[in-house]
Image (cartoon, rainbow, N blue to C red):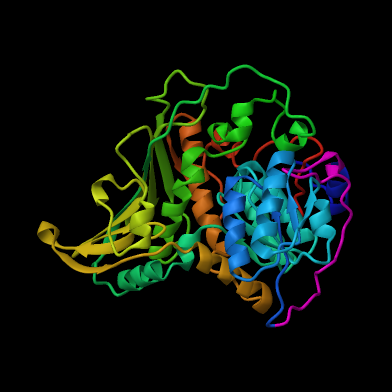
Amino acid sequence: MKSITRKSFLSKSGKGLAGTALGGLAWSSLGRDRVLGANERIGVALIGCGGRGKLVIRHFIDQGAAIPYVCDLHEERLEEAAGLVAELQGRKPKKTKDMRNTFDSKDVDAVLICTPDHWHGPMSILACQTGKDVYVEKPHAHNIWESRKMVEAARKHNRILQVGTQNRSAPYNHAAREYVKSDELGEVHLVKVYNLKNSKTLQLGKTDPPPRGFNWDKWLGPAPKRPYHYNIFRSGWHHFWDFSGGDLADDGIHQLDLAMMLLGNPDLPAAVCCSGGRMHHRDDDSEVPDVQIATFNFDGLVMTLEATTYPRYMRKTTGTIRRKDEFPYWTQNATRVELYGSELMMTIGRHGGGWQVVTSGGKVVEQMYGRPADAPHVQDFLNCVKSRKSPNADIEIAHPSMTMIHMANIAHRVGNVKLRIEPGAERFIDSNEANQLLKRTYRKGYDLPERV
């Protein structure tokens, strides 16, 4: 893509950016040089007021943040979020459909981005450029090139950019990492990552006009134009490559990133292969696989990632287990990681599943219960906004895991093949077709610049 300047980018973006509008945003340095006192409350704007946004903003308020703004294109969601925030913090936030207002506000130190996935990268980059710190939900980028640009933007503009992969702030996961480092497992040459979930078919139905006052074109943003469908807006966008990387990116990223953390954050693998397709929900409108197996080849290690969206008996770790000293029934736990050492085997669950180490006959030799880390992850971010230290899920740490997810999807999309990865280049060897998918085509007016 032709390189354009930031000024050109912001000018072209005048026709809108995301679950908020970008329109005509001028460069602003408000808040860039502000130094927060130790006891001063951090102002965080919520951008994207769907279910996830309303859930995460609770943690920010609980951890002492002030919420001066809520932002969304959809009027009903905007009102619901504003009412919730007012109830929780005892003060009404300002409401806006235009994210420029959050970026230009002196009351906003950071933004929480909970929009649909295809807006995570562009919004994060723009927030960094306008002097705001960022907590962005996973998956943090729509494609590999975009993820790399997020790293560049955070470093160039000296911004804190935390990704919502909360496993990196869970004490039980850090303890598991120390156990792996101790070599008690022996040599680990095989790691299996699971995202074996259950979901329904997707039927789009007829097109209909968007709700009054809802700007569908701005919701689409960098994605190609298409007619409004209620079922796409509500959550069906997860099923289309224009907006998402399927459940591999939306949920499997949690487990894969946890596996990378346990292994000490290795570099990218030398090769990736993937097989799968739409095998169970064959006649619906989804583009993404409901069965998918990816294999990543590292030096001395093979990692697999198995994903489904159809078995009814597979379950995430339940809320009861997450709150108590219990372990899941691992065989039917949908979101686990298995590390096969030469001496012992470790099984670990995300978001509070805990971990167990076993030897022959299933004898448990070590274990630790777990708790979800949503609150500690938010607190880590807020602490780093003040201290300017790197957060637990800094964008540069999160980038390799996100890259692997996208590489697996690319290997599937170009024919369920094996692709060799060029060392240090984040691109494929001898596959022009695969390299075309490293970056999306950004719709005119929503371009991202080469220089961020």
Residue at x 76%, y 61% (from the top left corner):
68
Would residue 326 be found to the left or right of residue 247 on screen?
left
Residue located at (57% from left, 22% from top): 204
Residue 407 screen position, x and y as percent? 50, 43
Q: Residue furthest bottom?
A: 38
How many numbered markers are drawn? 0
Looking at this view, name the residue that lies furthest to the left: 361
Is 389 positioned to the left or the right of 285 in the image?
right
Q: Compared to 10, does 103 lie above or below?
A: below
Picture residue at 71% right of the left edge, 62% below the top: 67
Residue located 73% across and 67% down the image = 43
Above or below, comparing residue 245 to residue 85 in the picture? above
User: In this view of the protein, which residue sits in the foreground, 271 or 193?
Assistant: 193
Answer with left or right where residue 122 lies relative to residue 355: right
Q: Quadrant of residue 15?
A: top right
Q: Quadrant of residue 342?
A: bottom left
Q: Is residue 320 left or right of residue 253?
A: left
| 389 vs 111, nearest the viewer | 111
The verdict on residue 191 being magenta is: no
Looking at the rendered image, the quarter that the N terminus falls into is: top right
* 31 lies above or below 255: below
Question: What span is colored magenta in the figure?
Answer: 13-37
Position of the C terminus, as image quadrant, is bottom right
Q: Is residue 34 magenta?
A: yes
Instruction: Choose between 162 and 275: the one closer to the eye.
Output: 162
Examine the image and state in which quarter residue 291 appears: top left
Q: Residue 18 location in percent, x, y?
A: 74, 43
> Where residue 419 sits in the image (x, y, percent)?
46, 40
Q: Main secondary structure of the magenta part?
A: loop
Q: Where is residue 122 shown, x and y percent of the image?
A: 71, 48
Residue 28 visible in the displayed image: yes
* Residue 395 visible to an observer of this rendering: no
